[in-house]
Image (spheres, rainbow, N blue to C red):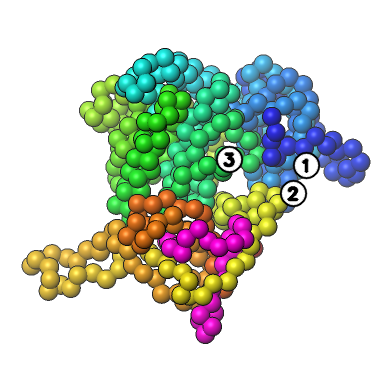
Amino acid sequence: MAYGGASTATPAGAGSALSATKQVKLERESELRIEVGTDAPLRLRVVAGTAEIFGTELPPEIWFSFPPRHKFAVFTWYGATVEMDGETETDYTADETPMVSYVNVHAVLDARRNRARASPAGSESSQGPRVIVVGPTDSGKSTLSKMLLSWAAKQGWKPTFVDLDIGQGSITIPGSIAATPIELPIDPVEGVPLEMPLVYYYGHTTPSNNVDLYKVLAKELADTLERQFSGNAESRAAGMVINTMGWIEGVGYELLQHAINTFKANVVLVLGQEKLFSMLKKDALKINPSIDVVKLQKSGGVVSRNVKYRQKARSYRIREYFYGLGNELSPHASIASFSDLSIYRIGGGPQAPHSALPIGAKPVADPLRLAPVNISRDLLHVVLAVSFAKEADQIVSSNVAGFVYVTDVDVQRKKITFLAPSPGELPSKLLIMGTLTWLET
């Protein structure tokens, strides 16, 4: 199995880098928790025994290079010796982990997938587990999601990963909700593959900007997946794993319930909060008496990330989209005339005049209204989504082909310069603008 972040080269002749090499022996069912230093990557390999990262087993004697500031844990079921080459911010071993309970959940899900595969095609019982992982911010939701997906892929299944976390983005850039089939255990360095993602662009990093739009896009994604499942018995039996945001109170809780209903989740995994578990158990069972709501302990390796850290993480994700994890990609700069592009913002726009409203009513902007955007210097450093829509009125219901980054706007010449992942014409001239910006460094 090939890994994008792996190298068979050994550090022979690496000079001073060897001085930072050290070996760590891990006992059975323990893990090594690592935060890579801020300035240089860390190389790591397994020299004895077996170990995994986020559910993906590491092949022996293969070096993996993890970028600066990367946080991860190397877990072993039966014992292992790990070698590290480079500097870490922190690294320590822990023997108290919730991994046994996590793998027990996987075993139950695997049994359900086998039952679904054995059921008549198209029947209700042919639907495999639809797992939604919920919990407060920094409770380990995306990590657990990756583990469940990797373990399923290792068993030969191709589950669908659904990412509703617009704040960080595990599949593509922040501000998007997306889904993709997982055919192999997830690469411990490069993360989720980007070969076949289905992406809808929300355009903001918090759902409070436009709650109605967030719900509509989630419904569009769910309906598209439903159509795909109806024609693919294998995907239907493999089911899905859904990662969610950390906003769990007020409107956030309402959006969690909306996701559970919209994606027809039949398993809810609650990480790290008793109150949320109690509320969901009561409310979810009202709607679907057969739904399973399970409380799980969060890992002790999960650390809280402040606002500044989250902003940096978003910036890294956007940079990674255009340049790759290790700057191995070469994005293409293109110039277009203002008249060649049509840019829209979803929501807002002119409101109805007070005189047209009932007495006492306040004017409310249509959250799904398409507002044309005049191209100006205000677009500088904005990330735009390229819609698959053929006509403007299809933008809200259409997924996107990818993203471009505006690097210059020449108002006098009416020219806009943007960075795209590849050369050539854009798949569409219809672009979507939100509040997502990026300062390239």
Point out the tag, 2 or 3, that comes first from the N-terminus.
2
Identified by mark 3, the residue type is Pro
Image quadrant assignment for residue 229: top left
Point out the tag, 1 or 3, that comes first from the N-terminus.
1
410 or 212: which is nearer to us? Answer: 410
Point out the tag, 1 or 2, that comes first from the N-terminus.
2
Q: Which mark is residue 193?
A: 3
441 or 433: which is nearer to us? Answer: 433
**Which segment is the magenta one?**
409-436
Identified by mark 1, the residue type is Gly
Q: Position of residue 327 (x, y in %)?
A: 69, 53
Left or right: 13 with respect to 400?
right
Q: Which mark is residue 86?
A: 1
Q: Position of residue 144 (x, y in %)?
A: 51, 31
Image quadrant assignment for residue 240: top left
Image quadrant assignment for residue 270: top left
Q: Image quadrant for the N terminus?
A: top right
Q: Which mark is residue 111?
A: none
Number of marks in picture: 3
Q: Rounded to the nearest whole Å, what is the CA distance between mark 2 and mark 3? A: 24 Å
- Element carrying mark 1: loop
